[in-house]
Image (cartoon, helix red, strand yellow):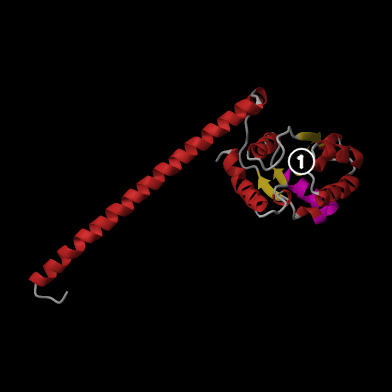
């Protein structure tokens, strides 16, 4: 499954919310958890790019914070101000140095709803951080468990491609998916038509055989 497929449902829901005049951000916040070197940051960056492509957020680069170096709430608030209208990625949220202060600031940012927040971390410790330091905010995040492990070469390849190249690759993948779905739809239609034709032809033949045998139709 591609990353686009992974986030497709969330993006569709956000688009529907916007059409109804509702704020899209609450359904977009995401917690991406998984083991070390599983590509969590790659997923977060890809998610931000897809949201921008779909027009759900402002077309601007995501702001990224390294949780292991995040030692005060003001740094988080400043980064969120830069990310306004876009995406703020907090990598390794479970490694922040001042969890109580960061947890309170996180809740405050979510209440403001000025940017999409994507956090990454290990499953157990990230969920523990949210439970102990930002429990009220936990329900606002969609949890994504990264079941796929990205190799080091895949992550390096991702870093070496430009956003435009990644966008072009996603567009090609979407086009292929669309063509595949259209082909399957046509095949199902032909099968249904064949089935209807077969039933239509069989029914008169059955009635004729019944009448020849002198049985009631």
Viewer-side residue, 194 vs 69: 194
Inspect this view and state whether residue 168 appears.
yes
In the image, taking residue 54 as reference, residue 91 lies left or right, namely right
Q: Is residue 201 above or below residue 67?
A: below
Residue 31 position within the rendered picture, expressed as x and y whole percent measured from the top left: 72, 46
Residue at mark 1 = 85
Inspect this view and state whether residue 72 appears.
no
**Most distant residue in the bottom direction:** 216
- Secondary structure character of the magenta stretch overall: helix
In the image, taking residue 104 as reference, residue 194 lies left or right, namely left
Residue 135 position by quadrant: bottom right
Q: Is residue 125 magenta?
A: yes
Residue at the spot 84% in from the left edge and 39% down from the top edge: 81
Q: How many marks?
A: 1
Residue 92 position within the rendered picture, expressed as x and y whole percent measured from the top left: 78, 39
| Span shown in magenta | 121-136
Q: Quadrant of the C terminus?
A: bottom left
Residue 17 position within the rendered picture, expressed as x and y whole percent measured from the top left: 66, 53
Viewer-side residue, 135 vs 162: 162
In the image, taking residue 8 as reference, residue 84 lies left or right, namely right
Residue 120 position within the rendered picture, expressed as x and y whole percent measured from the top left: 74, 41
Q: Is residue 196 above or below residue 85?
A: below
Q: Is residue 64 magenta?
A: no
Label 1's element? loop
Q: Quadrant of the N terminus?
A: top right
Residue at the spot 89% in from the left edge and 48% down from the top edge: 100
In the image, taking residue 57 as reference, residue 112 lies left or right, namely right
Viewer-side residue, 141 vs 126: 141
Residue at the spot 8% in from the left edge and 70% down from the top edge: 212
Crowding at mark 1 (Cα within 10 Å: few <14, some 14-19, many 20+): some
């Amino acid at each position: 499954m591609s990353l686009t497929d992974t986030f497709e449902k969330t993006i569709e829901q956000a688009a529907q919310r916007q059409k109804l005049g509702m704020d899209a951000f609450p359904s977009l916040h995401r917690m991406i958890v998984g083991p070390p070197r599983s590509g969590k940051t790659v997923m977060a960056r890809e998610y931000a790019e897809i949201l921008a492509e779909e027009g759900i957020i402002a077309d601007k680069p995501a702001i990224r914070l390294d949780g292991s170096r995040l030692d005060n709430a003001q740094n988080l608030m400043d980064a969120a101000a830069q990310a306004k209208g876009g995406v703020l990625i907090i990598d390794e949220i479970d490694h922040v140095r001042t969890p109580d202060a960061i947890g309170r600031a996180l809740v405050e940012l979510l209440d403001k709803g000025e940017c999409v927040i994507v956090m990454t971390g290990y499953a157990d410790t990230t969920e523990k951080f949210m439970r102990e330091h930002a429990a009220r905010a936990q329900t606002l995040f969609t949890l994504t468990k990264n079941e796929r492990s990205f190799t080091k070469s895949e992550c390096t390849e991702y870093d070496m491609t430009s956003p435009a190249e990644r966008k072009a690759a996603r567009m090609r993948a979407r086009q292929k998916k669309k063509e595949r779905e259209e082909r399957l739809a046509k095949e199902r239609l032909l099968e249904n038509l064949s089935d209807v034709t077969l039933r239509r032809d069989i029914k008169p033949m059955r009635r004729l055989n019944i009448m020849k045998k002198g049985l009631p139709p």
